[in-house]
Structure formats: C-alpha cells, structure tokens
Image (cartoon, rainbow, N blue to C red):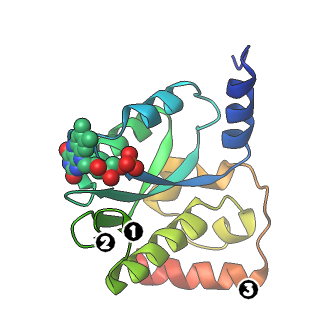
C-alpha cells in the first residue's frame, strides 16, 4: 500500500492526501470523463477515501455526461459525490469556443458547488457534531474524517444555515 516508486506518483499522492474535498473541473470526451483524469485517479486509492467532491463540467452539452460518468467512479474510490454541479456549454459560455464568458446564472451555481464542498465536504467536528446527521455525512463518513482545517464558529454558523436551507 502506498509503495510508490515514481517521484510524480509520490507528489500526486501527497497532494490528494492533503485535501479533505475536491472540485473536479472536467471536459467531456465521447460522453465520458477524460482518459487523462481517469488515469490520474487510478494511480491512487486510499488517498481518495472518505472525502467529498463537487463538479464543474464543460463541453458541447455542458459536460453533464462526463460528470455522470465520473460520479460512478466516485463510489469505488469512496468519495461522496455532492449534488450541486455547474454545466458549462462550449456554445454559450465560451467566446469562439475558447475564451471563458460564463452566463451570470453560473456564478450562483459555482458558489453553490463551492458551498456544498466546503460545508458538506469539510471534515471539522465543530460543524459535523453540532448539526443533525445527514445521509451524505453517513455515506461519506465525514464526521470521522481527518480534521485539518478547524473552522471558526462564524464558519460553523454559515454552514449550519447552508445545510438547513439546502438539505
Ligand atoms: C474526440 C473528442 C470527443 C468529444 N466528445 C464530446 C462529447 O461527447 N460531448 C461534448 O459535449 N463535447 C465533446 N467534445 C468537445 C470537448 O468537450 C471540448 O473540445 C472541450 O473543450 C475539451 O476540453 P479540453 O480542451 O480542456 O480537454 C469532444 C472533443 C473531442 C476532441
């Protein structure tokens, strides 16, 4: 376990291990997530476990199939996939299919993804112990996950409010 020989794998392992939650920003290729991302995910296992993830997809159809595809992978590596998602169309959210020009509705959506990841994916006990247990917490084991960033009480209040308005 975790017996890596390549320096790049060791660096990748340390980076993924150091984080409690992730936001995957992914393109869609032939109705799936990219092969490069899947390959990078496959290099590790334990480092991903008992974390949470949110998603921003992009592509001709907003990358929604790529995100659905990636959600299937999440279960196997024991990541709780969160509901909020941003779907960016190459047709309407990028100028000439290159320059990012998001519609203002996506501003709200991206904040929702960030809040879900921050409040539901955060592993701090001062937040998780003070609110009712939710199915996503049970699924992710979030209450038992490592606590690397202890939130302030202000953050705890903000997250409590977020949970009660979105769950
Ligand atoms: C081989 C190939 C397959 C693609 N398949 C899809 C697709 O199934 N659905 C979609 O919405 N976009 C598809 N696209 C468009 C890509 O999502 C789009 O080009 C995107 O910008 C790629 O992101 P990247 O340049 O960051 O890798 C495809 C592009 C290529 C080159």
Q: Is residue 49 left or right of residue 71?
A: right
Q: In this orientation, which residue lies closer to the viewer: 109 or 135?
A: 109
For label 3, the crowd category at 10 Å Cα-Cα, with few meaning under 14, some 14 to 19 and many 20 or more, is few
Q: Of the numbered discs in the image, which one, if any, rests on residue 95?
A: 2
What is the number of the mark on residue 43? none
Q: Position of residue 27 (x, y in %)?
A: 35, 49
* Residue at image point 63% right, 30% down: 46
The earlier-in-sequence mark between 3 and 2 is 2
Q: CA distance from mark 3 to mark 2?
A: 39 Å
Foreground: disc 3 or disc 2: 2
In the picture, measured across the screen, residue 152 lies left or right of residue 159, that is right
Q: Residues within 10 Å of mark 2 (few under 14, many from 20)?
A: few
Q: Is mark 1 within 8 Å of ligand 1?
A: no
**Which structural element holds mark 1?**
strand
* Residue 87 visible in the picture: yes
| Alpha-carbon span between mark 3 and mark 1 | 37 Å
Residue underneath mark 3: 154
* Residue linked to disc 1: 99
Asked whether the residues under the numbered discs 3 and 1 touch, taking CB atoms below 8 Å apart as contact, a structural biologist would say no
Quadrant in which the C terminus appears: bottom left
Residue positioned 71% across, 20% down in the render: 2
Please tell me which residue lies in front, 86 or 130. Answer: 86
Let me know if residue 67 appears in the view.
no
Examine the image and state in which quarter residue 96 appears.
bottom left
Up/down of 47 relative to 111, above or below = above
The residues bearing labels 1 and 2 have C-alpha atoms spaced at a distance of 5 Å
Q: Nearer the viewer, residue 118 or 6?
A: 6
141 to 116, vertically: above or below: above
Secondary structure at numbered mark 3? helix
Q: At 58% across and 48% down in the image, what residue appears?
A: 51
Q: Label 2 near label 1: C-beta < 8 Å?
A: yes
């Amino acid at each position: 376990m975790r017996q890596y020989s390549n320096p790049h794998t060791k660096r990748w392992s340390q980076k993924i291990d150091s984080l409690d939650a992730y936001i995957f920003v992914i393109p869609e290729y032939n109705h799936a997530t990219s092969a490069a991302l899947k390959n990078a995910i496959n290099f590790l296992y334990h480092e991903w476990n008992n974390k949470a993830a949110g998603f921003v997809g992009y592509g001709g159809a907003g990358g929604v199939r790529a995100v659905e595809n990636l959600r299937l992978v999440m279960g196997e590596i024991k990541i709780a996939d969160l509901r909020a998602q941003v779907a960016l169309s190459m047709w309407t959210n990028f100028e000439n299919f290159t320059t990012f020009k998001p519609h203002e509705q996506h501003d709200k959506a991206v904040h929702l993804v960030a809040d879900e990841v921050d409040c539901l994916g955060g592993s701090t006990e001062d937040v998780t112990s003070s609110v009712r247990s939710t199915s996503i917490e049970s699924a992710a084991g979030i209450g038992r996950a490592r606590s690397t960033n202890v939130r302030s009480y202000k953050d705890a209040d903000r997250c409590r409010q977020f949970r009660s308005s979105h769950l």
